[in-house]
Amino acid sequence: MKNTLLKTDEIGIFSLGGLGEVGKNMYIYEISDQIYIVDSGILFPDDRLLGIDYVIPDYQYLIENEERIVGLFITHAHEDHIGGIPYLLRKVKIPKIYAAGIAVDMIEHKLGEHKDVKSPQIEVFKAHYKYNFKDLEMSFIRLNHSIPDMFGIVFKTIHGNVFHTGDFKIDFTPVGPPAEYDKLAKIGAEGVLCLLSDSTNAEREGLIESDTKIGKSINELFSKIEGRIIIATFSSNMYRVQQIIEASIKNNRKIAVFGRSMERAIEVGRQSGYIIIPKGFLLTEQEITKVKDSELTIIVTGSQGEPFAALSRIANGSHRQIKAHKGDTVIFSSSPIPGNQEGVNKTVNKLFRLDVEVITHGPLADTHTSGHGSQNDLKLMLSLTRPKFFIPMHGEHRMLKYHKNLAVDCGVKPENILIMDNGEVAALTKDTIRLAGSVPAGDIYIDGTGIGDIGSAVIKERKTLSEEGLFAVIITIDSANKKLISEPSIVSRGFIYMRGNEEITKEFALLAHKVAKEELNKKMFNELNMKQRIIDTLQAKIHELTLRNPVIIPIVSDLKSN
């Protein structure tokens, strides 16, 4: 089905996730009626999405236009870029997935966990590969990020080059292979029609430290610590994990790993060669008790204060294998993601109560650096590529606005910059850029095994239950004989304590009795009407007496005597 928002010669660019938010990245390029999907990520929910595991984009547009999809192209292996792939494949037929390096291993591992998903062919590309499609040559530019094998994507179209950076920072002394700045300069010299660039750190001034410097800092820290080291970082940050391993070996420490995602990342990293642990240095759970504290490093998940991660369970005292004690040093080799600060603070406070040393990133210890470029990095990208048109991506709305200002400073005309929301379609030619309209782009909630089963009404109800509690009224009736068989009984959960509040619960029961009798005596009895009247009447009375609004559930049992 052709996109009616676009004119015949226009390129369409839009996002189903990643604009106005950090996460859920999925960008769509429509070129000569063909659809190219870049990334398929998840968003980790905040506190208001009670019980939700992940948030994914609404794939409706892709479902309706499945026959035009060429493939899914992956920039790198972070969860906010590949975590949605199993859910996408359940809904949409993708002819081929294009990925490089560590991303291939991570995707294969992920799909292996979802046995019900049939994987398409994974085409493994390298930095020098080029693919020719209808009116398009696609190529790749290696950039630096906090995970290996991060690639920007160049769409060479009949109108000019469109460049999608993916996540990046400028690091002149990276841990892994250097970025291909020569390719950036080359497409800049050819002319970049439109740049889409990472906005995560668009508000941040100053220098983003090199990962190499962080490695030296971690090694220096380890050399000063006498007791056991427990260190938490992102499992996906393989460069950091390898630096921790190297610092441990230099300081004669054996290594143990706890946390499912960390164990998986190290397994994949060892298979791909990014994680190197000499024989005899990686301990099993049973072996850690045989090693002195001064000769042990424990690498764990939980750097963001996640409640069920290994570090949180250690802080709670509920971890089966590891009990923190005096003499331990806990290091956070990460910075809190926006929204996670409270969880991190709780974990830190609990660790202090256990009388352990806690080191977080700060002026006294460089234990973390961002994988996203600051303002200077973003300006350098703009200066190297010199785009005619610019769409800031990957960021909350204020980040996109800051990035727009940086682009203007670098010479991009303000009228040539589009700040967009998910679903809004940019239409591009060699001379013009415009907002052409929008396609469906909402949030789909993953709750356990359910995809999209939970809507905003259920989330609202969960929030009410968590704050206001539940109030149930159980009534037995005989509608055939218009009789109330028993007095209404009241059950309260998380609303009021029944014992000690007998008078108030009796008043609610009498009110329910009165409404039930009135409804039974009506010429045309309707059970749904009875339930709704009980809810409305009790809701008003409960709020009047308690100023609370619990979820009210009337349960009516109708005997219907003959």
Image (cartoon, helix red, strand yellow):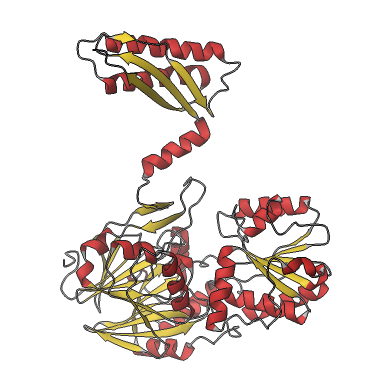
Question: Is residue 314 among what the camera can see?
Answer: yes
Relative to the observer, which residue lies in front, 425 or 97? 97
Q: Is residue 468 above or below residue 265?
A: above
Q: Residue at x 46, y 84 (%)?
A: 142
Relative to the observer, which residue lies in front, 62 or 275? 275
Numbered disc total: 0
Relative to the observer, which residue lies in front, 6 or 215? 215
114 sits left or right of 224 in the view? left
Q: Quadrant of the C terminus?
A: top left
Relative to the observer, which residue lies in front, 238 or 266? 266
Q: Quadrant of the N terminus?
A: bottom left
Q: Residue at x 77, y 53 (%)?
A: 352
471 sits left or right of 240 in the view? left
Indicate the position of residue 13 as horizontal and vertical percent values. Answer: 29, 69
Indicate the position of residue 369 as horizontal and vertical percent values. Answer: 62, 71
Q: Residue 226 appears in which quarter of the rendering?
A: bottom right
Indicate the position of residue 434 as horizontal and vertical percent values. Answer: 26, 67
Q: Residue at x 50, y 66 (%)?
A: 200
Q: Is residue 546 above or below residue 130?
A: above
Q: Residue 33 appears in which quarter of the rendering?
A: bottom left
Q: Residue at x 61, y 57 (%)?
A: 309
Q: Is residue 142 above or below residue 26?
A: below
Question: Is residue 236 among what the camera can see?
Answer: no
Indicate the position of residue 442 as horizontal and vertical percent values. Answer: 33, 54
118 sits left or right of 524 in the view? right
